Amino acid sequence: MKFLLNKYLMNLNRGKIKYLVIEEHIKKLIDKSNIKDGEKLPSIRKLAQFLGVNNITIVNAYKRLQSEGYALQKMGSGTYAKKRDINRNLNREYSRVLKKIFSSEIRCYIDFTGETSSGEFFQINLFKDVLNEVLDRDGSSALIYQEPLGYEGLRKSISDIFWNNSVNAENILIVSGAQQGIDVVSKSILNTNDTVIVEKPTYSGALSVFKSRKAEIVEIPVEKNGVDVDKIEKILQKNNVKCFYTMSYFQNPSGISYNDDKKRRILRLAEIYDFYIIEDDYLSELIYDSNIKYNSFKSLDQCDRVIYIKSFSKIFLPGIRIGYLIPPRKFRENIQNSKINTDIATSSLMQRALDLYIRKGMWKDYISELNVKYKDIYIYTEMCISKYLGDKVDFIKPGGGLHFYLRIKENIQIDSISLFREAIGRGVLITPGSLYYKNPLEGKRYFKIGFSHVNKEDIENGIKILNELMI
Amino acid sequence: MKFLLNKYLMNLNRGKIKYLVIEEHIKKLIDKSNIKDGEKLPSIRKLAQFLGVNNITIVNAYKRLQSEGYALQKMGSGTYAKKRDINRNLNREYSRVLKKIFSSEIRCYIDFTGETSSGEFFQINLFKDVLNEVLDRDGSSALIYQEPLGYEGLRKSISDIFWNNSVNAENILIVSGAQQGIDVVSKSILNTNDTVIVEKPTYSGALSVFKSRKAEIVEIPVEKNGVDVDKIEKILQKNNVKCFYTMSYFQNPSGISYNDDKKRRILRLAEIYDFYIIEDDYLSELIYDSNIKYNSFKSLDQCDRVIYIKSFSKIFLPGIRIGYLIPPRKFRENIQNSKINTDIATSSLMQRALDLYIRKGMWKDYISELNVKYKDIYIYTEMCISKYLGDKVDFIKPGGGLHFYLRIKENIQIDSISLFREAIGRGVLITPGSLYYKNPLEGKRYFKIGFSHVNKEDIENGIKILNELMI
């Protein structure tokens, strides 16, 4: 192993803390499998001599490797490399990086991890007027009354404007975003060892919730127009499946949308095999490709088989934390009670403001504007990917939404976890694909680029940097 | 059983839907145990004849009894009365009643179920100014940025103003109220069959969460200055306990507060037996009795054994849905991730507004005012209870908070569930004690009167009505 370490490592990193330099370097070697899982690391004395540092520097480096799960000390025998459980550790590493960016510990200039609209096109003054109108109209009530189902006015607006009154306002439950929707639904319908079918890849936040319910998770690969329905049917023939979690438009992360045929087939299966479809409709407002028509599972559902979850945070404003849920009759009371147990109710002032914003037609105007703006950025991003990464990645064109999902071609050596780590060093943040799979190794060739939080210039710069790193 | 039914029942209820009248009447008889569990109901033909109605009316009434769990049909044998599982059904009944009141289906003039400050003393204009100041200062950011731990400014204010900087802002996690705090903590630290100690009686919302985690719940009776610590120790000697859930001040529902000695003893036990204390500090701002000093478990904790949960919704404004959580170091990362899995983050604009409200000193002023106002109503309510119910109930004087917990004396026949039901008919709403016990029968003699949503005149009227019903 010594030969993998550059003798002049310390000279190359003069002025930096020595044990950190050594630790980082060994970590990279383990990540890249240059040092194998279980391989014995050099003795402290020998490595110190080789690198021209004190023994204590190596001791410190090894201690840190151990504490980060990269090494194992065996009493009286030495220190051994340990391939980390990347599933758990990557998740943790990713959220730590995001936390550091929030707290400005890491300066990241080009952030491709955005999953929501950025709000830069949002006219805050209009919303401010709406808020003031609500406060003048409702006084303290706007901050006092908690309706367990959510503010009745908002539920009526949703019924009226988004569902043309085909859904009764009484059947709508306001939640604090899609994540809470998934959590509340899981608590109501999932028990230990219940089987959940998910798309492969799928949203990591949903995977975490299902795991925390100790459900059996079965992944079905996503294809061009939705998951492989034949595979679903095979699973159903052998297993008692409780529900299928799906993102029907611009699936996160694959970017695919279901065609109506697949949706209808899955709905029929739900009826035959008695399971429910959790539809996470998170960004269907942003359709750029006119061939894509909007028909949710819910709108095609004849047999009350869909648990529909809609987030306003992703398309509208992340900080507003409002979404809604339409449960089937069978689970209605359970899901309502589960919401009450989770946080009683969702912030009432924001619900009232959103209600008025929708009623005044501002919602519609804003969404139209977002469609124009983001379509432009979408086209630009696609152009940059083709131009700079065209021979290094494969990808599909989602035709809507706010991201691309790229697959690194076989002839490129770097995997997406290393790319993620190295890109941070260049001020670029991407989401490694591994987060979206039960077995993170399956995502090693994939990464996601969200373009909603980056301007055009930086999109080009960021993709150029990725090009430089992808060797 | 026929003899229990008034032959003129139908005449007395002329104009009402017949089968509903019969159903309601039989339900009451079952609830009061005038009809015993398992007793055979009269045959359809006989009862129809007796009451002078069609057979189909009785069929419909029996069907409804069945569907509501009040009757059981045995093939070829007839219909039998069924004492309902009051635990599950009472909870459901109670939340249905609350829902109906929200939607104005039931007119309830005197609502003693309030658990929060009412907001009638809240100066909405001050808060409106604060909101506008935030929007002018932060623009769209106020609605866009989501910090996973919560808005940093608010965390700093909390550290500064409520903890005198003894708690680092990095260790504070903003949540959407205490209910979410309990939910997030449970998801992070509780697994199936883990043992949780709770106070008996205790907050039903917490019980529901622990049950949904499939925890073993052990109840320890509340005494004058807190739970019976010797009993806790006995449990600890035989069981592996994960945590103890407690409300340290004006415990809901018993109204008792812990003295420092009990708090210190429990903290010592936590260290010895390696468990954690979930402290739900929900209304400690409202202390009317100057003998009661404020020292939370958290403030006395030397060994990082307390998971502190604070709600702003209960004391401040229910609709604001903000609270915070201070986890011990050991669980910090788990609890933070669990919050992210639950709903990602809490509404950011409201956090910013609350921050500014606290910084400007408005929070302090408002709490002082609430103390004066509610002390006055507290004294008045106590006076009314003593005057009208003095010979019918026992109760302790909490010395703070927003409610009284009353025990119906032995010589009074009615139990609190029947009292709850009959009071609704008179436009008065109380909370039956059964909701606060694992075994609801233990709460049959207790009920709770919250005085924060009722004016003085109605407090007197409501208590007079309860007096009339308590025979």
Image (cartoon, coloured by chain):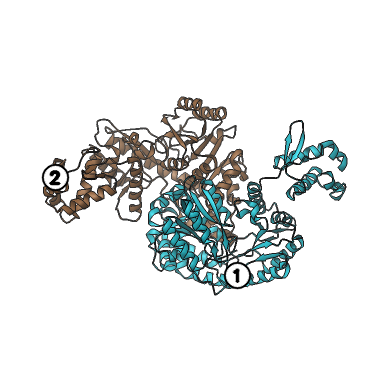
Chain colours: A cyan, B brown
Q: Is residue B454 above or below residue B301?
A: below
Q: Which chain does the numbered disc 2 sit on?
A: B
Q: Position of residue B122 (x, y in %)?
A: 44, 52
Q: Is residue B82 above or below residue B259?
A: below
The image quadrant that residue A458 belongs to is: bottom right
> How many numbered circles does the render carry?
2
| Nearer to me, B246 or A127 | B246
Q: Position of residue A459 (x, y in %)?
A: 69, 66
Q: Is residue B284 above or below residue A153?
A: above
| Nearer to me, A311 or B378 | A311
Asked if labels 1 and 2 share a chain, the reply is: no
Q: Is residue B285 above or below residue B97?
A: above
| Nearer to me, A299 or B202 | A299
Left or right for A410, reference B414: right
Does the CB distance between marks 1 and 2 fall below 8 Å? Answer: no
| Nearer to me, B435 or A184 | A184
Q: Secondary structure at mark 1?
A: helix
Left or right for B214, reference A443: left
> Which residue is identified by label 1?
A374
Farthest residue, direction bottom: A290
Q: Which mark is residue A114?
A: none
Q: Secondary structure at mark 2?
A: loop
Residue at 70%, 42% in the rendered image = A68
Residue at 72%, 70% in the rendered image = A387
Q: Kindly identify the amino acid type of the residue bearing the numbered disc 1.
A: Tyr
Left or right for A38, reference A237: right
Q: Which mark is residue B6?
A: 2
| Cα–Cα gap, marks 1 and 2 | 72 Å
The C terminus of chain B: image quadrant: top left
